[in-house]
Amino acid sequence: MKIALAQLNYQIGNFELNTKKIIDHIAKGKEQGADLVVFAELAVCGYPARDFLEFEEFVDLCEQSAQEIAKHTTGIACIIGLPVRNHLIAGKDLYNAAYFIEDGTVKAVVKKALLPNYDVFDEYRYFEPATEFSCIEFKGQKIALTICEDLWNINNNPMYVSHPMEELITQQPDIMINIAASPFSYLHDDERVEVLAKNASQYQLPLLYVNQIGAQTEIIFDGGSMAFDKDGTLLDEMAYFKEDFKIYNFEAGKLQGLTQIDHQIVPDIEQIHDALILGIQDYFQKSGFKQAVLGLSGGIDSAIVCALACRALGPENVMAVLMPSKYSTGHSIQDAMDLVNNIGCMHEVIAIKEAADAFDKMLAPAFHNLPFNIAEENIQARVRGILVMAMSNKFGYIVLNTSNKSECAVGYGTLYGDMCGAIGVIGDVYKTQIYQLARFINKDGVVIPENSVVKPPSAELRPDQKDSDSLPDYGQLDKILYQYVELKKSSKAIIEQGFDEALVRKILKMVNTAEFKRYQTPPILRVSPKAFGMGRRMPIVGKYLS
Amino acid sequence: MKIALAQLNYQIGNFELNTKKIIDHIAKGKEQGADLVVFAELAVCGYPARDFLEFEEFVDLCEQSAQEIAKHTTGIACIIGLPVRNHLIAGKDLYNAAYFIEDGTVKAVVKKALLPNYDVFDEYRYFEPATEFSCIEFKGQKIALTICEDLWNINNNPMYVSHPMEELITQQPDIMINIAASPFSYLHDDERVEVLAKNASQYQLPLLYVNQIGAQTEIIFDGGSMAFDKDGTLLDEMAYFKEDFKIYNFEAGKLQGLTQIDHQIVPDIEQIHDALILGIQDYFQKSGFKQAVLGLSGGIDSAIVCALACRALGPENVMAVLMPSKYSTGHSIQDAMDLVNNIGCMHEVIAIKEAADAFDKMLAPAFHNLPFNIAEENIQARVRGILVMAMSNKFGYIVLNTSNKSECAVGYGTLYGDMCGAIGVIGDVYKTQIYQLARFINKDGVVIPENSVVKPPSAELRPDQKDSDSLPDYGQLDKILYQYVELKKSSKAIIEQGFDEALVRKILKMVNTAEFKRYQTPPILRVSPKAFGMGRRMPIVGKYLS
């Protein structure tokens, strides 16, 4: 039996596009002699469709698409992921399911049992977990088909009481297939190989795994579909961050003609680089926009975002706005211009003095000669926000936000100023990783000017300001943030690792009191196991470490 | 047996405050001869604690608080809600639970089985559902204790397969107690009475129900704790939007000395009014702020927010900033000043011309004489945003957002301009309800100037602009929005009700394409069954009705 895995980029709610892609790849499979073409979890509607799933019409469109797809399966079979209705009296209205379609007919419906409901996942919001399990019989073989999380319950402290493979194995399947919507993080690909290999060897079955690719706003799917031998040996690994399509020959209980390969080890920073480029591309392409605008300060963060945007959209589609203030140093403009020249994007220079002065003058009667403080600093950042948004409104450019994760974490940024934008490009990348990203971008020649990389970071909102006036050293800061944000360690546990107690308490307090700011930031491209945004849900008005 | 219900206002993560409140009310119960004092769901840590629950230290603090509370139960018993650890190998790490504490000792732990995971609720993100059920034995009586949603599974299409009361009833309890964190919506109080009455009559048991009050950022708990006779008769109803404490005498299978009362019928708009005032008060009090600032345009929306803020915080704590533009009509300033004079709050007048002109001039070279469009309109709105934020930064005032639900829905507002603020006061109130709210506020004398109520709504961002230039009549708009947002009807179903097809499609498209704006709006005080914000989760980059 020849089984094709189709690793595709879907769009949420774009039934026309998704259906066409699926039908085209069934045709491709047929041409190449496949018996079965396998598509990803919820391929028909895109993942995550969120509360669209609460609309009857949306679910109807999924079923209609499946019927349309079925018409194109003469002489072939396919597996497609889609939501299906629960017709029992009790329980949630939908299942996260897959249709096995053969020769124009839906022959089997497989339902997901383990519904991830942590981090960015909300599956139990919509779906009832499956409680019955059956293998699919096809061409004399029994396929144990599971959906993503269904295979993720094999550690020593399982999150779920149910265990789909333990049920399916009693039916003596010949092969396992898992269809997934498994998002990227720079740690997740290794974990995935491990979990899948463990399943294969535990059940002594070959395993085919198909993921999807593409960014859905902040969530990025990286692909990397795989084939395993029954002892858990990795036999094949498909492309990362790209669509891919491969056919595997399953005969005599074995995936034929393949030998052991090593999992592609790609440095974290390169993975992040590729993920961010896909994230930018898909945000624009899927929302129908072509051109981006951003504020370019001469600092490293906006330089990185500009470079990534140029790689994603082409330099001719990126507008960099240089907005010097009276506190900007001469080298800032020079560093920004060096980048523009290195990269060839559009640019404008608009000094902010006139508007900033107008605000100072207009506010003078109300401010009663109170001393310069954060109010005046923020006015400058917000004037820049207005300018970038004005360029967006006038020309239809989409604003890229340039805040990094360290700043987002501690609230070192101005709401409606430098925190504006449609999408946060590097909001899940710590400052220390930003430097690595600059080195990576520069590996084949200077793009990010060396001076942007080596100079001390500064917001330049008052004379001689440095980030280090307000923030601890980024090396220390990022390590403590990682313990708290990614690893969810308590202050006590972090201090026990040898970090300064006062520093830890100060940083955790900064993080917790900045929730009100993060609530209003743009969606952030997720590249870590714990990004700010919908995967991290904190009270705003609370009193814990704050 | 005398059972006290303590309906209190908790703060998330404020263990000191919550523990003290609980201990004080145990003492109060003891003084008044109570045998048992009952507190609400997750009273110890506050509800919803969200991802704080993922921190070990946070859960430890809950347990420590419970041990502290236990020390104050000599000669008395209490029921407190708190998260407890799941010590089984499989399943999520926590239960949403209650301790029954008697005479210094935790005598029973009751766990919640039905975990709401829709709208604003995320309980399955943290908690494992209970599968075992036992009544509590106390003073010769058996108490069937359930937690909130556990009683909400009695309709004909239950959301859950499990049914806690069906298990508990087999143990022949004498009384039901339900502890809750049941948020307000202007429809929810009636529904609650109905569901609880149905439980009492179905199981032929008296029922005591205790809710909490207070706002936790956007979610408002309204109290309204209740007592029912075993035939479902309502016997008592505690205060709404206020703390309350009452003792009931349960003897011989009956709540003694009470007779049937009617559920307090309060007009929706009065409930919304009271809820918003509590929402503002608690946002400020719990985050440690006293004073508010808002832009006052002379229109009805900002007038309402100003009036509510003055009622919540006192007019001496509210700063209204009047920011006329060259397109502001003379009556706008007059209407705004009339409100300030009616209400006695602080005010400043800051014309925006100078800054708006500065932006036009600064942008002229980049704009290349392109015609006036949304860019210039938004500059004005954003200049106002900067001014209000500057007043906030200079004086520590918290910015109140004044966008209404109709505007939020269709994206009729400027990001970083009029959409700025720390909390959205009327973002869950449709424009047609705004008028009702104005009449209600004016019922004992004019507060909102009549002209603000009767004049046609306008953003005044270009000459002679009216909302009706861009938006359908609010009467029609709000009806269609209600069908789509609250009732989740499909376009087809809405059109079948007789609304114009083109209009329905236009409005639904406006709603769906405004997701990127709503993602960045402040949290919105929730008063309806479906508010924008964390209870409505939509893809941003998608393609459905957009």
Image (cartoon, coloured by chain):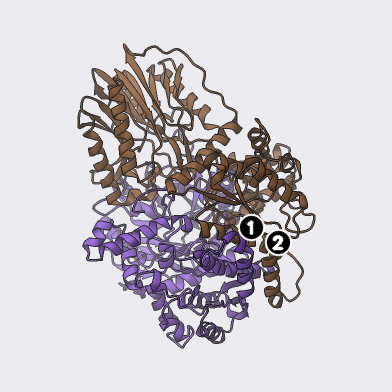
Chain colours: A purple, B brown
Q: Measured along the vertical axis of the image, is residue B84 above or below residue B74?
A: below
- Quadrant of residue B114 within the rendered picture: top left
Residue A230 visible somewhere in the drawing: no
Q: In the drawing, does residue A405 fall left or right of residue B77?
A: right
Q: Position of residue B45 (x, y in %)?
A: 34, 42
Residue A424 visible somewhere in the drawing: yes
Assign the C terminus of chain B to one quadrant of the image.
bottom right
Task: Look at the numbered discs 2 and 1 and tell me whether their residues touch, using CB distance below 8 Å.
Answer: yes
The chain ID associated with circle 1 is: B
Residue holding disc 2: B377
Front-lying residue, B264 or B351 = B351
Q: Measured along the vertical axis of the image, is residue B403 above or below residue A22?
A: above
Q: Check if mark 2 and mark 1 are on a common chain.
A: yes
Q: Measured along the vertical axis of the image, is residue B334 above or below residue B516?
A: above
- Dot 2 surroundings within 10 Å: few (below 14), some, or many (20 or more)? some
Tag 2, which secondary structure? helix
Tag 1, which secondary structure? loop
Residue holding disc 1: B414
Q: Position of residue A391 (x, y in %)?
A: 65, 70
- Quadrant of residue B344 within the rendered picture: top right
Q: Position of residue B63 (x, y in %)?
A: 25, 42
Q: Which mark is residue A228?
A: none
Earlier along the polypeptide chain: callout 2 or callout 1? 2
Front-lying residue, A496 or A487 = A496
The residue positioned farthest toward the right in the image shown: B464
Q: Position of residue A340 (x, y in %)?
A: 56, 83
Badge 1 amino acid: Thr
Badge 2 amino acid: Glu
The chain ID associated with circle 2 is: B
Assign the N terminus of chain B to one quadrant of the image.
top left
